[in-house]
Image (cartoon, coloured by chain):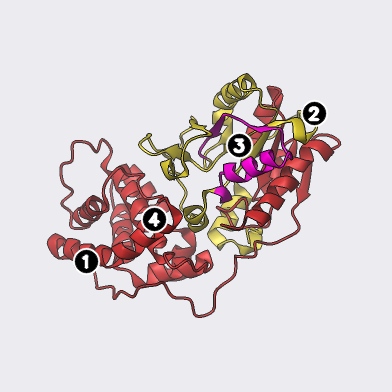
Chain colours: A yellow, B red
């Protein structure tokens, strides 16, 4: 599903007409083999730690999700109601797959799992997030991250 | 996601984006993206399917090694095996939704409380099995979420000092109520499609009728923020369309 034709008509129209930022060039940074990389997750699912201020419409800031945060302490505060949440309710890994990455780390498929991960809230113009995204990049580099998996909802 | 990938990569951090809307990735052109044919809200596809999720992650991260240059967009070949209707599915409980009587706050609140009470054992079972709940974004108890929703529908929103933005708080309370019900509906571990779960919730529960009544109220409000929350943040567009709501 999430082929355009599977979406409700109103969502299809919104998605088709959504103004997307255009970039003149596309950056491309190479790195070592995956088995040597340190991997972080950056999601736009609007995840917050329980008790933190939820995201609201138009928010362009981010939340910090330490890798040792128990799954029971992570909530979703996305502005949109037009996506499925039942899978996330059953299994946090469907959006924020740290358990899966830990297994891949144990199997030697990735080098290591980052100490800290990050959450933005989609459904807002990403150009407003640029400064915060660059700040997150700085934090990722401090954690020696050289592979980021970006997960939307 | 795709724009964030640009910013991260420009700062020197290699990235790969999972893409749910292929058209957006085509337009934005992130350094590397894996389009997945899954439902919105499920970037890894199937809940509780470790092997499937791991295949998606491996395909995505693999692009970090194999992409020959920028703006690579590949397609994941398989559909989410759990995104199908379960024939004859019903939740593990049955409830008979009453009607909403405008202006009768106490009667509505009592009826909603009874419904919440009826499904409470199923929500407890869900939490025991899954060892977590996604209820809690409002910071209120479920009883207080019911109280807030009932009060607003009856036109007598209580003065609650901790609520700096009552309409936003109301929206979070509605999110928590929806999560509470949908989690309770999953208590027996069955995996119906989200479409089945949403249809049952919006067709059979009193709380859904209350949320629709709230939506109607907010749409009629003079206040723009209330109108926006009513229009966009309470009832999913698919349900607005299916139920023929205005």
Quarter of the image where one finds residue B169: top left
Quarter of the image where one finds residue B4: top right
Q: Residues within 10 Å of mark 1 (few under 14, many from 20)?
A: few
Q: Residue at x 46, y 53 (%)?
A: A81
- Of the two numbered discs 1 and 4 on the same chain, state the one appearing first in sequence: 1
Q: Residues within 10 Å of mark 3 (few under 14, many from 20)?
A: many
Q: Which residue is mark 2?
A: A32
Q: State which region is magenta.
A: A93-121
* Residue A41: numbered disc: 3
Q: Is residue A138 above or below residue B47?
A: above
Labels 4 and 3 touching (C-beta < 8 A)? no
Q: Chain of mark 3?
A: A
Quick one: which residue is furthest to the bottom in this view?
B88
Q: Residue at x 50, y 34 (%)?
A: A68
Q: Position of residue B85 (x, y in %)?
A: 56, 72
Q: Are marks 2 and 3 on the same chain?
A: yes
Q: Are marks 1 and 2 on the same chain?
A: no
Q: Position of residue B189 (x, y in %)?
A: 48, 66
Residue A4 seen in the figure: yes
Q: Is residue B99 above or below residue B146?
A: below
Q: Is residue B42 magenta?
A: no
Q: Which residue is mark 4?
A: B127
Q: Are marks 2 and 4 on the same chain?
A: no
Residue B235 seen in the figure: no
Q: Which residue is mark 1?
A: B114
| Secondary element at image label 4 | helix
Q: Chain of mark 2?
A: A
Horizontal arrangement in the rendering, residue B59 relative to residue B117 (left or right):
right
Q: Nearer the viewer, mark 4 or mark 3?
A: 4
Labels 1 and 4 touching (C-beta < 8 A)? no
Q: Chain of mark 4?
A: B
């Amino acid at each position: 599903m999430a082929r355009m034709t599977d979406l409700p008509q109103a969502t299809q129209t919104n998605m088709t007409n959504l103004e997307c930022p255009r970039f003149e060039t596309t950056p491309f940074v190479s790195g070592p083999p995956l088995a040597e990389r340190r991997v972080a997750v950056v999601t736009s699912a609007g995840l917050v730690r329980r008790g933190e201020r939820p995201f609201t419409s138009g928010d362009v800031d981010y939340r910090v999700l330490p890798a040792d945060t128990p799954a029971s302490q992570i909530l979703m505060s996305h502005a949109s109601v037009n996506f499925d949440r039942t899978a996330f309710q059953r299994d946090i890994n469907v959006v924020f797959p740290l358990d899966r990455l830990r297994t891949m780390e144990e199997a030697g498929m990735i080098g290591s799992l980052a100490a800290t991960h990050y959450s933005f809230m989609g459904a807002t113009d990403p150009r407003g997030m640029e400064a915060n995204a660059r700040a997150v990049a700085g934090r990722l580099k401090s954690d020696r991250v050289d592979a980021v998996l970006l997960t939307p909802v | 996601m795709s724009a964030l990938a640009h910013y991260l990569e420009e700062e020197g951090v290699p990235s790969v984006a999972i893409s749910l809307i292929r058209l957006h990735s085509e337009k934005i052109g992130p350094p590397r993206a894996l389009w997945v044919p899954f439902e919105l809200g499920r970037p890894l596809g199937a809940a509780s399917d470790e092997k499937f999720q791991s295949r998606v992650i491996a395909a995505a991260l693999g692009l970090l090694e194999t992409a020959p240059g920028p703006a690579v967009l590949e397609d994941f070949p398989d559909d989410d095996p759990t995104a199908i209707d379960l024939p004859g599915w019903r939740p593990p409980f049955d409830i008979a939704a009453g009607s909403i009587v405008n202006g009768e706050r106490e009667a509505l609140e009592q009826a909603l409380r009874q419904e919440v009470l009826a499904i409470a054992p199923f929500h407890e079972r869900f939490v025991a099995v899954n060892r977590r709940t996604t209820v809690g974004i409002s910071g209120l108890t479920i009883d207080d979420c019911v109280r807030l929703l009932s009060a607003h529908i009856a036109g007598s929103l209580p003065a609650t000092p901790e609520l700096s933005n009552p309409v936003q708080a109301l929206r979070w309370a509605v999110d928590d109520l929806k999560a509470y019900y949908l989690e309770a509906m999953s208590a027996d571990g069955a995996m119906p499609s989200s479409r089945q779960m949403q249809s049952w919730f919006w067709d059979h529960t009193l709380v859904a009728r209350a949320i629709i009544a709230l939506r109607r109220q907010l749409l009629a409000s003079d206040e723009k923020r209330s109108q926006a929350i009513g229009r966009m943040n309470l009832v999913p567009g698919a349900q607005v369309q299916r139920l023929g709501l205005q």
